[in-house]
Image: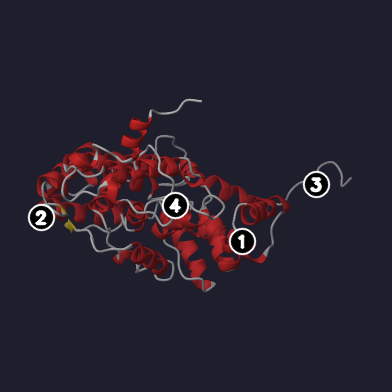
Amino acid sequence: MVTLDSAIENELKNNVGYDGHLSASATKNADAVRFSADDADIRPPFFHDTDRIIHSKAYTRYIDKTQAFYLCENDHLTHRVLHVQLVSKIARTIGRALRLNEDLIEAIALGHDVGHTPFGHTGERFVSAFCKENKVGCFCHNAQSFRQFHNIEKKSKGLNLCVQVLDGILCHNGEMVCQEYKNNKDKTKELVLDEYHKSLEDEDASKKTIPMTMEGCVVRISDIIAYIGRDIEDAIIVELIKRYDIPKDITDVLGNNNKDIVNYLILDIINHSYNKDSISFSVEVYDALRKLKVWNFHNIYNNPLKTTQDGKIETMFKTVLYALLEGKLPEKIKRYYDDWLNNERSYDYIHNNKEARKVADYVSGMTDDFLLSVYTDITIPKSFGMSFG
């Protein structure tokens, strides 16, 4: 058995040498807090959290979850697994320039979207409607990402991620763009938990959350930077838009391709945030980004060509959600759900959550293909074969 030299092990466990190079606004490894006591490890705490995240079942399911475009037969479109990697890379680029904690940034970035439903924000609307109809609150993917890591993984024991990581995940809100992002330094782990529980009951609650760390602020804006130009490239690939459709007053500032948009936004943030206690854009770049986000919304995300199948997708979600809730399932699907609920969840989870919330947890964790498969099993008649014998 190989063991570390005790002096080396002690130095690694105490994070000697890393915190010293960080800026005054950065989150130090020595300040990491967990909800439960945890054994010391040679890995720094936020670095360790990244390992826990990428080895989780929820992270594995990123591979077949929609980013912006679903039901398109093109292997070059962005999926959720690539999106979180892009967020991580962009956020770490900014974080390195500002001397923030890159380990914390990476953990937040890679974990922030595990709560997304199949079929992206479209599916999220339908799951939230189901929760409201059955009086179990609401559904928003950022709170579900927190929930996945804190209440569902590892037979509902959770991964015991650092409070700063879970807070950054809860507060990422990539759908909201601001000129300046300031962190709430006074947050406690009790307040983080309170914000999480409120976000399960009120859709607007999660929109009001503010990260407790500068690193959380960086990931929040990097989420937007990662998708705003990339979605344009994907929309061009599927012939939804043309590059010259983007208004000139936007492209004159940010450019008309993902590479330029990402580069200009990153450099503008670094220029206006260096040695400061907030993450900021210049007025000109913020205005262009805000306009581009509105333009993307109308011309890409809500484009009538893209939404033609949404009625059928809604029917699929409702069928699967209510079949699970009412127990009207094919035998194979019933076995899957019973195994997930009774063998992978804890006694406390089973008895402290209403049935509709359990169903929402299960369906939101599905990949696109698995949801389609379950819907097919529920709705399409099966052949009896050559005989009933």
How dense is the environment of label 2, judged by Cα within 10 Å: few (below 14), some, or many (20 and up)?
few
Identify residue for label 4: 160
- Tell me residue 49's x, y (percent): 39, 44
Question: Do residues under tags 3 and 4 come within 8 Å of each other at their CB atoms?
Answer: no
User: Which amino acid type corresponds to the residue marked 2 in the rendered image?
Assistant: Val
Q: Earlier in the sequence, mark 4 or mark 1?
A: 4
- Tell me residue 376's x, y (percent): 63, 50
Identify residue for label 2: 283
Q: Is residue 95 above or below residue 157?
A: above
Mark carried by residue 288: none
Q: CA distance from mark 1 to mark 2?
A: 52 Å
In the image, taking residue 326 as reference, residue 92 lies left or right, namely: left
User: Which amino acid type corresponds to the residue marked 1 in the rendered image?
Assistant: Tyr
User: Comparing marks 4 and 2, which lies closer to the viewer?
Assistant: 4
Q: Earlier in the sequence, mark 1 or mark 2?
A: 2
> Can you see residue 276?
yes
- Could you tell me which residue is drawn at 69 percent across and 52 percent down? 335
How dense is the environment of label 1, judged by Cα within 10 Å: few (below 14), some, or many (20 and up)?
few
Q: CA distance from mark 3 to mark 4?
A: 48 Å
User: Which amino acid type corresponds to the residue marked 4 in the rendered image?
Assistant: Asn
Mark carried by residue 384: 3
Outermost front residue: 6
In the image, taking residue 328 as reference, residue 46 lies left or right, namely: left
Q: Earlier in the sequence, mark 4 or mark 2?
A: 4
